[in-house]
Image (tube, grey):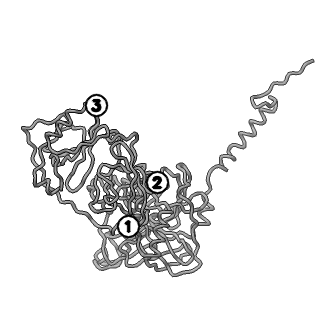
Amino acid sequence: MKTQTRLSIAGLPAALLGPLLVLMLLAAPAQAQRDLPDFADIAEKQGGAVVNISTTSSRQRPGGLPQVPGIDDEDLNEFFRRFLPQPRPGQPGPGQPNPGLPFGGPGPNAREPQSLGSGFIISPDGYILTNAHVVAGADEITVRLTDKREMKAKVIGTDRRTDVALIKVDAANLPTVRFGDPSKLKVGEWVVAIGSPFGFENTVTAGIVSAKGRSLPQENFVPFIQTDVAINPGNSGGPLFNLRGEVVGINSQIYSRTGGFMGLSFAIPIDVAMDVQQQLRTQGRVSRGRIGVVIQEVSKELADSFGLANAQGALVNQVEKGGPAEKAGVETGDIILRFDGKPVTQSADLPRIVGGTKPGAKVGMQVWRKGGTRDLNVTVGELPDERVAQRNERSRPSPKAEAAPNRLGFVASDLPGERRKQLGVSGGALVEAVQPNVRGDLRPGDVILSLTAKGQTTEIASADQLDKALSALDKATTVTFQVRRGESSLFVTFRGE
């Protein structure tokens, strides 16, 4: 008699398949539990190096949120903001009633808590990293350790451009953090924050890396790590750990409509912060490179106009006279593709790369100009201290209703001689009026200096020349204008029909 044995898909006898499936099902919860991250070890071993930072000042700060320059109050909550200064639980904040004082609040010269944040110890002798905005304007800084010791700290240096501060307490044998490599972080990887949200010391929150290399408004030198870790007021300046217990970032900003956590948090990569603190420790300031250009992002339409296959690089819309870029031969309309051997994928990459280059260094750069690449050498200058640039708003001419708009929907006239002299140009066309729903961001008062289409650039000498140049182009052609607007220069694109 022949015996037939039926095999499963896995090649096992059917009699063994049932018990095997039962064992697999029983083992699944245990396996799933093992796959979940365990943050207890990080909290236990690294928590002692995280400190609470509070400051006092005799100067009253206005209450509410710090304002973002150029943003209306009603839109402020839509933009990135620094963490709110908050007192410890039970303490009144600035401008809030204090039952313990006459008339319900402190007097105008009272010393009161102005900021509460976090930090972490990077050396046993008391050097601590935090955010610059945590200690900004402080007369006195108090650092509180997890063992309840409190110490006065002094500021070694701050850098507002990266929002990094280095402070120090007089102590020895302090616990310290370990450092990781932010470049090895992967989107989706688990990360952990330890800090003092709302004054609750040594609070642990966790999440994942949501994105890397984020550019934020008014932040040109930091490729932020975006996470969904719960970060709230008071976490500012605290460390962001990977699962190996290594610091990979400093929690710095949140995006919120309420002032609290809404799922978008941003951290300064630790390699950026450590470079800043090293310069602060050794020379008391941060030295950054500059080349003297104003740039803008390269959109798909701009790339088409300049004959560039892909939307990449940084488009130069203004070159500083006598600056390093002009001396190197950089021209308005160039698209910088590489700098010092590093690719410039988007315009935000260039300030970071140039800023990280040592002033005085001679480096190579590759630009796209008139349909081809060119290699230039530039001697990097030094970025001066921050200063506020003010623009002089000029009155715009009244639209001339009797003039007929061109095929793109705007009216242009010859640029008056006095205006040409002010701008230092020999030609140009003045935009007098713009029809509603025009396809490009052109405005009355703009001065058109050149027209670029199909990779070819034409200097504009008069309004008549401008109209003839436009008439010679097919309606499907994408057109880019170089424009002077007030004291600024930019490129404006009209997409073809």
**Would you say 156 lies left or right of 395 here?**
right
Asked if residue 333 is positioned above or below residue 377 in the image, the reply reads above
Q: Is residue 421 left or right of residue 318?
A: left
Checking the image for residue 160, the label placed there is: 1
Of residues 60 and 107, the one nearer the viewer is 60
Q: Earlier in the sequence, mark 1 or mark 3?
A: 1
Q: Nearer the viewer, residue 267 or 192?
A: 267
**Which structural element holds mark 1?**
loop
Of 338 and 177, nearer the camera is: 338
Q: Is residue 249 left or right of residue 64?
A: right
Image coordinates for residue 440, horizontal then vertical, percent: 24, 41
Residue linked to disc 2: 342
Q: Quadrant of the N terminus?
A: top right
Which x, y percent locates residue 381?
36, 65
Where 346 falls versus 284 (above or below)?
above
C-alpha distance separating marks 1 and 2: 25 Å
Residue type marked 3: Ala
